[in-house]
Amino acid sequence: MLSAEYPPRWGGMGSTVFHLSSALASRGHNVTIITRNGGGKNIPSIPGVEVISVGWLRIPMEFTRSYGRTALRALKKLNKSNPVDVVHLHCPMISWTEKQFRYCKMNIGPIVSSLHGSWLGEKDGLLIAKEQKETAVWANPNDLAILLTSKRYAKFENQALSGSDVCVANSEATKRDFISRYSPPTDWDCEVIHWGVDTEMFTPAETRDKDLRRRFGCSEEDILLLAVGRLAARKGYGSLLRAFALVNSEFSNSKLVIVGRGHLRKRLLNQAHSLGISSSVYIESSMSFEELAKLFRNADLSVYPSYYEGQGLIPLESMSSGTPVVTVNHGPLPEMVDSEVGSLFQMGNINSMSSTIIKEISNMDVLKDKGIAGRKRVLQKFTYEIDAESFIEIYDRIQ
């Protein structure tokens, strides 16, 4: 597997590659991950999984090309000592040319490309964030690079469609996105496999952790809302704060906790102050996965207002924790969330978001039932065991 992200890096791609490789190794397969160096020294050790770190240029967007080159060199070396059966790319954070795809298929092995989302979709998410007057849309160099260069790097995504033996989109929305934006071959083989979540880490609580809730100003009767994700404009936190101000005016015992790394923390706190809700808003910039899992299971409701996702794992992590979700009625989110496990609101509509949240927290008994239904849905449809079996079928088919 070639993935630009791998633990201990944060990010959905790193998490999915870690858990998928672990599930494959537990079934007797040998997996090698070729990833970027600099992620840290404490890479988790998994029996049957080898990790090779390679160099890359620390330049926004261009790292996908430099990492692609060094990853291919490492792949060639690996194949000489230990012949590879299948090469699994995780796009779009690796950019290969037609020549590189052709070399790999002719000299190393068949290629599966996982489509985690598109650069043009990321760009659209940023433009929507700008329309919605999100805080500091272009303050992040990576976001600015996406705006300016996404068309160039989209060409490499198009190469993945024609250069791979099989493409695997992480949602029906992502598959539609690639069909509408690019030029897949007429015989394009593309399947949809939703990523799962760690159902052992993200698990419901038998009793509430009073000390944890008290840390965020919540008594037993108070309402704890949780939002998780990188502090970036396209995640929609500015809109969330405006919606929460309306929620808080009706439910003064409500608190909002936002967990995510990024450059917007101070700006979001200033916005909360301007809205008069600063005493009810908490922003955590750093939290371990274990702490985050505990927070998920102790929240009453999670909110996910993102403007663009390939799939979006946060709603599933919340559902796995027994906590209902409200999210946007857009893109891949309705493929996971509906009225049985939470609710959907109109993307970018403050009144729709606030009224949806208010409706959900107005009946805590119904909310608890939705949490139970969410956990059940994840166990039935969104696990890495299911993912592993699905990918094994693809690997076997193309060898």
Image: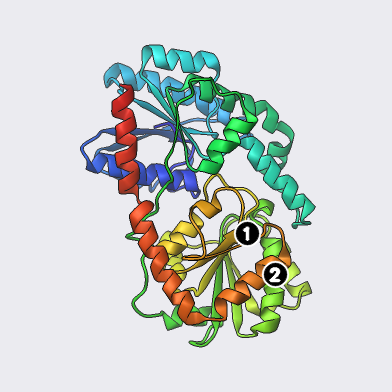
Is 385 above or below relative to 90?
below
Q: List the residue tagged with mark 2.
A: 243
Q: Could you tell me the amino acid type at mark 1?
A: Pro
Nearest the eye: 296 or 215: 296
Question: Pointer 2 and pointer 1: residues touching (CB < 8 Å)?
Answer: yes
Q: Residue at x 48, y 20 (%)?
A: 187
Q: Could you tell me the amino acid type at mark 2?
A: Ala
The image position of residue 254, as x and y in percent, is 60, 80
- Which quarter of the image is occupied by the C terminus? top left
Nearest the eye: 178 or 106: 178
The image position of residue 44, as x and y in percent, is 34, 48
Residue 351 in the figure: left or right of residue 383: right
Residue 281 in the figure: left or right of residue 91: right
Q: Secondary structure at mark 1?
A: loop
Q: Secondary structure at mark 2?
A: helix
Residue 163, numbered label: none
Nearest the eye: 128 or 359: 359
Is 394 above or below relative to 6?
above
Is 352 above or below relative to 218?
above
Q: Count neighbours of disc 1 (C-alpha within 10 A) and say few if under 14, some if 14 to 19, many if 20 or more.
A: many
The image position of residue 37, as x and y in percent, is 47, 36
Q: List the residue tagged with mark 1.
A: 305
